[in-house]
Structure formats: structure tokens, C-alpha cells
Image (spheres, rainbow, N blue to C red):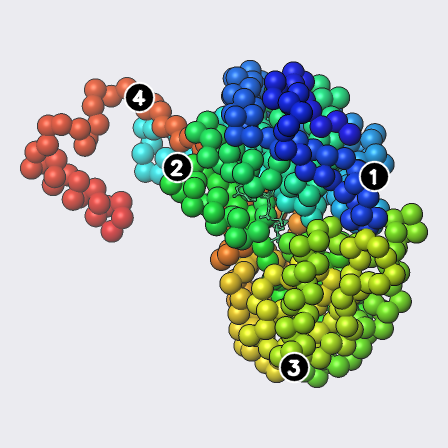
Amino acid sequence: MQTTQSPAIPEMANGNRRTIPNYNPATMEVIDHVPVFTAAEVDALVKRARKASKDWAALSLKERSRYLKRLQKVIVKRKDEIVHTICEETGKTEMDGILEVFTVCEHLNFTAKKGPSVLKPQKRSTGVFLNKAAYTNFQPLGVVGVISPWNYPFILTAGPVVQALMAGNTVVVKPSEVTPATTLKLRELATEAGIPEDVLLVATGDGPTGGAIVEHPDTDLICFTGSTATGRKIGEICGRMLKPAILELGGKDPMVVFADANLERAANAAIWGGYSNSGQTCISVERVLVEDKIHDKFVQIVADRLKEMKQGMRHEHPSLGSMTFEKQVHIVTEHLEEARQKGANHIMEGGRHGDFQGLFMKPAIVTEVTSEMKIWKEETFGPVIAVQRFQSEDEAINLANGTTYGLNASVWTKNKKKAKRVARSIHSGAICINDVEANYIMSHLPFGGVKESGIGRVHGLEGLRSFTNMQAVLRDRFGMKKELWWFPYSESRLKLFRRVINILFG
Ligand code: NAD
């Protein structure tokens, strides 16, 4: 695995430097060690990215789009190798790996195709001012710092990188210390696509390396994906520095299932939404709210299907792989244990899987959960769904909104009016009706959270433009000697404005 980027920075040769082992969590074998970039090394990367930003920003939108189309071709050609790298360091199944590649291709395709029209100057109305013309420029910001987590190392690095590049910025990325190889692979792919070397730079390392990017006076935007706790720290620093930040944080997504739902589809969705990628998805189904009348039947269907699900090593093509991060195994275990102590019913026990050496956890279903339990209010991020029953629509909405998070949600009913009504009442960045998580791959839809799930949007027109300075431009059309509101002021002018207000707005 390539862990350096040329020209190598001098400190890289220092034998005493700190490194982090990268290991395969399904086998616990160490794959490699990656260097921890110091603040001085981050500074060197930001300077290189700054220097490169002038030429990159000067390219036309079509030229940048051509680079991205070439990157897309390289990704398609080398997809198996990318899946291998992702799976090696995450322990996820090959299907979950290929879904990462598929998602990146869909967003890359959108960004390269639509980028030029979304980012070209856009005419705006001047309202009552017929003597003026107005438009917006979408200017590159400069150097974007992208900081990403470990659960989808390809999607959550390539996604923001591609949007930042299309918008004319250069990028310094800090991948998660748990999954650095996929980001290093991305840089390799970008190089093959001909993207200039200093346009995309990678700083491997842990929290302090990310902190150095955030605190650097010459990074112009931080696009962070990760936990709410880290997002809060980054938000505080960016607030102090008045640096824009897009914060894509945690979730505790509710799935609301009414008695008139297509039960088969809803149960299958709960299983995929709750357990794919071992539940380590920011928009995974963590809380299932089921109308009382169908509660027991629904839980039974989910449990029966789960019992048939194959879990195992990648080459066996299972549906469930291993967890990625040991710390997460402890959090999941703690939530299951606390729920047990507080009287919840573990329909499927879950917990560490004894048949494997790696970080495998069995799927769990927990019912008779109360809103005070951690398993209901804190992000579990594992192969677990917590179930509560409800009697009325109002109760379902209150339960769904009853956490500090607001990322994704889903509502299940055949009644379209009810579905739309409930969707409007749930506080979340996105909601699916009779579907689960699929909004994430719809490249025209903006994505992001409310409440403690984050600030700002990626994806779609709004996301792409978040990586720019939306500069408003006003042009005078007729060159009159002066405007009516310029000096000198007089009583007659005041009267004129009173009349104009009455005529135009009265
Ligand atoms: P994390 O917050 O621990 O780490 C995320 C990244 O931030 C890592 O690269 C880490 O090294 C870096 N980091 C840590 N401390 C830092 C600091 N002080 N300054 C700068 N960078 C720092 O999160 P994680 O455990 O890697 O990821 C899991 C979390 O990410 C979950 O909460 C999940 O819901 C969330 N997530 C959100 C989305 C979304 O789009 N909303 C997507 C995926 C994951």
C-alpha cells in the first residue's frame, strides 16, 4: 500500500515518526502501518494545496468536469481492487463494498455532468429595479479540508472530495485512522486520472492531524463527517475562526411502521436498514416504531429472517460481515447490556460472535424498550434494532422526534396522505416513504442533518454550491447620473419614496 506522496516531505524519512497500524477487523491481521502527520507536515500540505489552487480554480468548469469523468472511468476499471481495499480494512462484505463504489459513481456522474450548469453564473431577478441586472457567481473557496470517518471510507471521502474539486477547490483529506488505505487508494486513482498532484493531498493520522487541518489559517472550508462529539469541537473552532464548516454527524434514525403498511417490504427494509454494513451506517435504522396491532407479527418476521442470514468471512459471500472498529463493539455491548438491566426484551441476544477471531457481532432485536434507555436515545451504530410500539399517529411522531438527532427517517403506510403528513412532522434532514436509506444515493437530493445530526448539506445542487462562495453580482444597466436614493436628501425626495412605497407595495 502506498503511504507516502511524492515529493515526500522530509520528515517522512525520519525513523522515529509515529505510525498507526491498519488492520483487517475480520481477521485481526495487520495490513500496514500509516504515518501520523504532524501539524508541521499538515502545514506543508496546505501550502502545496494553496499553491495548486490558483491553476485549478482557473480551469473552466468543463475542464474540471473532464478530469472527474476520467476519474470515474478509472474507478469503474479498478472497482474490484477498490472493493478489496475497502473490505480489507473494514471487514465489510463485498456487497457492502461494491455498494460504496456504486454510490460514489452515481454522485461522481452527477457532479461531472451537472457541475458545469449548477456552478455557472446564475441570472437573478432584480425585482422592481428594472434598471439593474443581477446574477450569482459560484467562486472556488480555495483549500478545502475533508475529514472522514471509518464506516464508509470510500463514499465519505470521495463524495466531498469530488464536490470540492468540481467547485474549483484543492483538497487536503484526513481519512479515519481506522481506514486510511481507501483514501490513499483514491489518491492513486486521481493520479491515474491525471488530476494534478497537489490538487488532492492526503494527511494520514488521528485526531490531532485532523485538528491541524481545522485550525490551519489557510484552509477555507472544513467538510467533516463523523461523530457529533467531534463535530461539536470542530464547529466550535470554526466558529471562533469564522471558517465555514459542513458538519455531517451522527443519527438515531426512526422507522415508523403503521398497521396498513406493506408488511413484507417493511420487514425486509428494517433488516437491510438495520443490519447491512453491520449497522454501522449513519442513516441506518436504529429505532423501529411499530403500530401496536402488528407489533408482534412484525417482530416475528424480522427475527425469523435474521436467523436465516449468513454471517462470515468475505470470500463466503455472507450478508453480514464483521464490525470495523473495536471501540464500537464496546458501545454496542454496553447499550445491549443497559437495556437488559432496565427490563427490555432481547428477542435476539446479539453480542460478540464466538465463532470468529475478528470483530463479529451477532444481530440483535430488542423490544419493550423505553425512551430513557441508551439503546433508544444514543447512537448504537451496530447490528441492533430497538423496537417500541405505538397506538396513534401523534404518539408515533412524538417518539420519532424524541431524540437529540435528526438525520434520516422512514415512514411506512399505504395511505399517501398520512405518509406525507407524518413526513412533514418529523424533524430530520431527509425522510423516505415506504423506502429506506435510498435518498442517500439520489444524487439530485441534498443530504445532511438537523439538530445534533449536523449543519449544512452535501449532494445535489445545494451540496455542490456549499463548496463555493456564492458571490452576488449587481450591475447597473443604464448609467444614469445618479440614483434616487443618493445625495442630496430632501423633503420632496422623502415624499416621493412615501408615494412609491404606497404604489408598489400597498
Ligand atoms: P469520529 O468523530 O471519531 O472521527 C471522524 C474523523 O474525525 C476521523 O478522521 C478522526 O480522526 C477525526 N478527528 C477526531 N478528533 C478530531 C479533532 N479533534 N479534530 C479534527 N478531526 C478529528 O467519528 P467516527 O467514529 O470515525 O465515525 C462514526 C461517526 O460518524 C458516527 O457518529 C456516524 O453516525 C457518523 N457519520 C455521519 C455521517 C453523515 O453523513 N451524517 C456519515 C457517516 C458517519
Relative to 314, is 201 on the left or the right?
left
Along the polypeptide, which appears first: circle 1 or circle 2?
1
Question: Label for residue 482?
Answer: none
Q: Real-space Cα distance between discs 2 and 4?
A: 41 Å
Relative image position of residue 251 (x, y in whole percent)? 59, 58
Residue 199 picture quarter:
top right
Q: Earlier in the sequence, mark 2 or mark 4?
A: 2
How much space separates mark 1 and mark 2, taking CA atoms?
40 Å
Callout 2: CB less than 8 Å from ligand 1: no
In this rendering, which labeled residue sits more in front, label 3 or label 1? 3
Q: What is the number of the mark on residue 478?
A: 4
**Mark 1 — residue?**
84
Front tag of 3 and 4 = 3
Residue in the picture at 51% in, 38% down: 211
Label annotation for residue 343:
3
Which comes before the other along the chain, label 3 or label 4?
3
Examine the rendering and report whether any part of residue 369 can be seen. Answer: yes
Q: Secondary structure at mark 4?
A: loop
**Residue type indicated by callout 4:** Phe
Judge the density around disc 4: few (<14), some (14-19), many (≥20) Cα neighbours within 10 Å: few
Q: In the current view of this chain or complex, which residue is farthest to the right? A: 316
On-image quarter of the N terminus: top right
Describe residue 84's horizontal placement relative to residue 484 as left or right: right
Instruction: Answer few, some or many: residues within 10 Å of disc 3's Cα (few below 14, many 20 plus, some between 14 and 19).
Output: few
Q: Is residue 10 above or below residue 365?
A: above
